[in-house]
Image: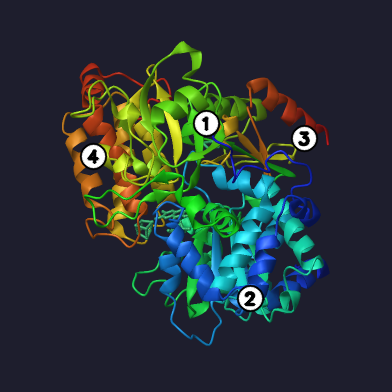
């Protein structure tokens, strides 16, 4: 039976910003019931029991994060909604905000009720102007309908949602970069601990959650724990630290496919199914060569690399749950945004593009990240100009292995995400990189003749 | 003479109660000024700082972090700002060629304004419209599936305004 979308159920309906239209589809009934009958802790427990893990990239269990807030705190406690969505090739949050903003807003209301926050800052990347105006209309409609503001429905619970626009910087998606940016400072991520739950925005306890996580909270509260757990993949019994990959998930498909689009499926669909069944297949009758399985930071899958011990299967067949990409050396599920690269495309060009992004977006605070991303860009630029040297590939891997929070050299995860695509691309497509160095192949994109000074 | 208009001042003032600290209004204030004046002058920075009880250097420090803001009069934005995405999904579907095409068509490099002052051309990192790659951001609105012809038509419209 084909999967019936829930998160995307209202996409395409008229008047997405209207409270009335959302109510017509059963919206806000759960929030009103919760206000009247349920205790905040019960909401936390329900979200915790559902196994919902954050959809922003790290996959941290949502209910568990909420319990890290100090108990009996006098307040204020802040909620920050992370709608910076700048991980390259990712656009699922945009679809939710533009097409069904109230599902997200109801999730925020429920979450704020649960964690006893009376103020949510909705940090939205500047580039999402349509989403901004839709959300603004939706929020205003909520105030008019008495769903936001003081003493909502006479429950004693008050809530404001404030939209706050970014200014075109990827690092504002990192949760403490977001907080610094919200506070009106340069978006330099903070050293953790303290984590935001203890000391976050304006030095108060703060929860940062992603837009899709909020939509999932709405659905968990509406349909219950058992429903949510009926989708996805249970924890690996051999891994005591695995929290499972439950629930529906939005996947976005981009790059060399016939039908780039956002689809909702139970967690754990394979890359192959996403491309072939949901993305209309690889374009121009070509074959896929490489896949980026979850935003550039996650690295690359080699479509033709066999999976050990699994007859006939390749990296194309890995499931996209929280554990799948890790099995083939990728960083994780990330944003579940897949980008398809066809067999006519040079991995040298692809990797140069990736390095260009991270070098541009490093906030510059940590030397290994600032310099490492800069040098990786210079070296990949040299490669694409046909001036690569034999040792360049090892240097790239060496740099990529050393920058990040995992090797312990940087403040935030941007550097890990900058390194991962470099090392996975070179390890998995080494022959192609070596051949390009040997032949001195020049990319058709490398325009000028200037020599690059990578010294 | 104050450089911030009464409208901008009242909009900034209206934002203050939404945040526990005035400094949080820095980015919204910079956006208001930048939108209207097409760059943020040092005089404007001083006035924003006064309204937010900050030192001008604090506003300057924040603003210069975001390459988004133009801070010199010669770099003043055109009437419209057109960003061509160079992210991977767009690059795979012709973004580099599109950027080159736009530069030639408008006779500017990315970051510059056309001679008639109408359009500032920029490149952008992924703008989150990869389902319509190659994509362009017109001010803050996505334009999807941009062929060279579609770009020319867009420029025609903007220059005829
Ligand atoms: C460099 C970097 C960029 C990030 N960008 C985003 C983003 O755009 N949106 C997002 O929700 N999370 C992003 N994250 C993850 C956040 O730090 C944080 O984990 C997340 O917002 C928590 O929400 P969740 O638990 O609901 O997933 C980013 C992390 C890093 C290191
Ligand atoms: S790792 Fe990079 S992006 Fe993150 S704080 Fe350090 S310099 Fe900034
Ligand atoms: S890569 Fe261009 S919109 Fe995402």
- The quarter of the picture showing ligand 1: bottom left
- State the residue position of label 2: B19
Structural crowding at the residue carrying mark 1, measured as other residues with C-alpha within 10 Å and reported as few (<14), some (14–19) or many (≥20): many
Are callouts 3 and 4 both on one chain? no
Which label sits in the foreground, 3 or 4?
A: 4
Which label sits in the foreground, 4 or 2?
A: 2
Marked residue chain, label 1: B
- State the residue position of label 4: A396
Marked residue chain, label 2: B
Residue A64: x %, y % from top left:
41, 67
Label 1 CB sits under 8 Å from any ligand 3 atom: yes
| C-alpha separation, residue under disc 1 versus residue under disc 4 | 25 Å
Q: Is residue A254 above or below residue A230?
A: above
| C-alpha separation, residue under disc 3 versus residue under disc 2 | 37 Å
- State the residue position of label 1: B90
Which label sits in the foreground, 1 or 4?
A: 1
Question: Is A277 situated left or right of A119 in this image?
Answer: left
Circle 3/circle 4 CB separation < 8 Å: no
Are callouts 3 and 2 both on one chain? yes
Say whether disc 3 or disc 1 marks the residue closer to the N-terminus.
1
Q: Quadrant of residue A198?
A: bottom left
Residue name at image x 54 percent, y 57 percent: A224
Residue name at image x 68 percent, y 20 percent: B149
- State the residue position of label 3: B158
């Amino acid at each position: 039976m084909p999967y019936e979308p829930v998160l995307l159920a209202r996409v395409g309906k008229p008047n997405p910003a209207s409270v009335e239209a959302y109510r017509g589809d059963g919206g806000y009934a759960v929030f009103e019931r919760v206000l009247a009958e349920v205790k905040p802790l019960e909401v936390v427990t329900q979200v915790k029991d559902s196994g919902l893990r954050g959809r922003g990239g790290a996959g941290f269990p949502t209910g568990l994060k909420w319990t890290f807030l100090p108990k009996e705190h006098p307040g204020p406690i802040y909620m920050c909604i992370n709608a910076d969505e700048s991980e390259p090739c990712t656009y699922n949050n945009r679809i939710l905000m533009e097409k069904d903003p109230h599902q997200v807003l109801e999730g925020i209301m429920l979450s704020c009720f649960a964690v006893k926050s009376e103020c949510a800052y909705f940090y939205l990347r500047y580039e999402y102007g349509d989403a901004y105006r839709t959300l603004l209309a939706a929020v205003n409609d909520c105030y008019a309908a008495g769903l936001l503001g003081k003493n909502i429905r006479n429950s004693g619970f008050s809530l404001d949602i404030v939209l706050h626009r970014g200014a075109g910087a990827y690092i504002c998606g990192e949760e403490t970069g977001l907080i610094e940016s919200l506070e009106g400072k340069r978006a330099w991520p903070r050293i953790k601990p303290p984590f935001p739950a203890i000391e976050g925005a304006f030095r108060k306890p703060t929860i940062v959650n992603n837009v899709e996580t909020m939509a999932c909270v709405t659905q968990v509260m509406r349909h219950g724990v058992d429903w949510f757990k009926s989708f996805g993949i249970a924890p690996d019994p051999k891994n005591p630290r695995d929290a499972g990959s439950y629930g529906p998930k939005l996947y976005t498909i981009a790059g060399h496919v016939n039908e780039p689009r956002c689809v909702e499926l139970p967690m754990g669909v394979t890359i192959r199914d996403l491309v072939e069944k949901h993305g209309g297949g690889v374009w121009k009758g070509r074959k896929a060569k490489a896949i980026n399985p979850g935003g550039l930071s996650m690295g690359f899958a080699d479509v033709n690399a066999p999976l050990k011990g699994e007859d006939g299967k390749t990296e194309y067949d890995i499931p996209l749950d929280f554990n799948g990409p890790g099995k083939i050396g990728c960083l994780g599920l990330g944003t579940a945004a897949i980008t398809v690269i066809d067999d006519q495309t040079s991995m040298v060009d692809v990797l140069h593009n990736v390095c260009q992004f991270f070098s541009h977006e490093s906030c510059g605070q940590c030397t290994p990240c600032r310099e490492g991303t800069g040098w990786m860009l210079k070296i990949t630029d040299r490669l694409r100009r046909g001036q690569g040297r034999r040792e360049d590939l090892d240097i790239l891997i060496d740099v990529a292995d050393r920058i990040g929070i995992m090797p312990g050299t940087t403040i935030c995860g941007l550097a890990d995400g900058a390194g991962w695509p470099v090392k996975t691309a070179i390890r998995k497509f080494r022959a192609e990189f070596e051949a390009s160095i040997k032949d001195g192949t020049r990319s058709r994109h490398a325009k000028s003749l200037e020599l690059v000074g990578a010294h | 003479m104050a450089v911030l208009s009464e409208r901008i001042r009242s909009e900034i003032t209206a934002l203050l109660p939404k945040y526990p600290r005035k400094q949080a209004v820095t980015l919204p204030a910079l956006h208001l000024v930048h939108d209207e004046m097409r760059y943020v002058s040092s005089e404007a920075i001083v006035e924003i700082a006064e309204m937010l009880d900050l030192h001008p250097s604090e506003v300057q420090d924040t603003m210069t972090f975001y390459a988004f803001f133009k801070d010199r009069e010669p770099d003043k934005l055109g009437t419209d700002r057109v960003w061509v995405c160079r992210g991977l999904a767009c690059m795979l579907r012709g973004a580099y060629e599109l950027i080159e095409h736009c530069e030639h068509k408008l006779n500017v490099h990315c970051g510059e304004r056309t001679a008639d002052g109408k359009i500032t051309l920029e490149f952008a990192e992924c703008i989150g419209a990869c389902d319509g790659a190659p994509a362009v951001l017109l001010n803050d609105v996505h334009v999807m599936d941009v062929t060279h012809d579609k770009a020319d038509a867009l420029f025609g419209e903007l220059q005829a305004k």
